[in-house]
Amino acid sequence: MEAVYEWPEPIVRVQTLADAATIPDCYVRPCSERPNLAAVPVTASNNIPVIDFASLASGRETAAVAAACRDWGFFQLVNHGIETAEEVRRAWREFFALPMEEKQRYANSPATFEGYGSRVGVVKGALLDWGDYFFLHLFPPSPPTKWPSSPSQLREKTEAYCAALAKVVEAVKRAISAALGVEEGFMEAAFGEAAAAIRVNYYPKCPQPELTLGLSAHSDPGGLTFLLPDEHVKGLQVRHAGEWITVDPVPGGLIVNIGDQIQLLSNGTFKSVEHRVTANAAADRISVAYFHNPQDDILISPASEIVRRSGPALYRPITYKEYKIQIRMLGLGRQSHVDSLKTT
Ligand code: OGA
Ligand code: NI
């Protein structure tokens, strides 16, 4: 597939639509995809598992990590020791509050996606999500000019946060290898010289949240995602046993989820689970997603040790580079991208 360099239609910033009485038709989902906003009760039994980072890093949570990755594809990581999370969220809030013409200087295109965006797929006439975002690569890094120059400390704060997070990610990868019953360095080797990127999601207030979604149902295409959720406003929902469970974020915690590449590497043992974000009439919401992805040109295929133990290999090998091109053409959506690699 060839990459595409232009958006198929003029871009409308969702933020400019927040104060209207109704939402444009291109945001109205078919009935089957509309969220049921009557609050889903969040109890200990239907919230995603919570795992303590200090215990995980010392190898004491192998069973809990295995159960979370297998049964939920998600967990919340508490006690991770990253102290700069709060100021990163605040800096990005400031960015999204800047005048539109300032933000437009960073308008992105589907050539690289870096910058200020309001859609992912390039299919003309596609249904759109009720959200704007800012996307950047950390490694290999985006050119400095792609970073907003205001607020002034935004780049330094974000990079410091991501550097601290990278250490947490390494420990989580070791825990995932242990949870899969493969050698400790398996994930590390499989990812090669891993890449990192962030997507800061900004979900403006929405006049008709019952008709739309902040982010449509998708699985994350990469390796692992570490989400810093909004401290006040819920919205992330995870598909579990056929239902949408609203995540109740633990204060100070990070939400970790398995992406498609770990589903492939684990031969389907660990699941890249569908999730989505609901829109909200009362408040806007911000989240900072950090994506830890395999080196672009390394082949990702089911671990031979897992295949030997419980084969056959369910997926054909693919590089992450090729995988991304498929997604950029078609937009994020469900599990169809992983499914397209099934061998049977
Ligand atoms: C994502 C994502 C969830 C959220 O950026 O891939 O799923 O709560 N974000 O913003
Ligand atoms: Ni996601």
Image (cartoon, rainbow, N blue to C red):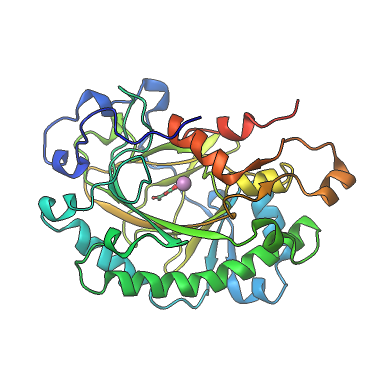
Image coordinates of residue 180 in percent, x first then y, are: 76, 55
- Image quadrant where residue 268 sits: top right
> In the image, what residue occupies the spot 47% across and 73% down?
163
Image coordinates of residue 1 in percent, x first then y, are: 51, 29
Can residue 239 be seen by looking at this rendering?
no
Image coordinates of residue 219 in percent, x first then y, are: 52, 41
Give the side of residue 12 with respect to residue 44, left or right. left
As displayed, is residue 278 above or below residue 165?
above
> In the image, what residue occupies the spot 65% across and 74% down?
57
- Image quadrant where residue 19 sits: top left
Give the side of residue 197 with respect to residue 20, left or right. right
As displayed, is residue 144 above or below residue 111?
below
Using the image as rendered, state which of residue 64 and residue 12 is in the foreground.
12
In which quadrant will I find the C terminus? top right
Using the image as rendered, state which of residue 235 and residue 59 is in the foreground.
59
Can residue 170 be seen by looking at this rendering?
yes
Residue reaching furthest right? 308
Image coordinates of residue 131 in percent, x first then y, are: 29, 43
> In the image, what residue occupies the spot 74% across and 43% down?
267
As displayed, is residue 26 above or below residue 200?
above
- Please state the total of marks drawn on the protein image: 0
> In the image, what residue occupies the spot 23% across and 33% down?
208
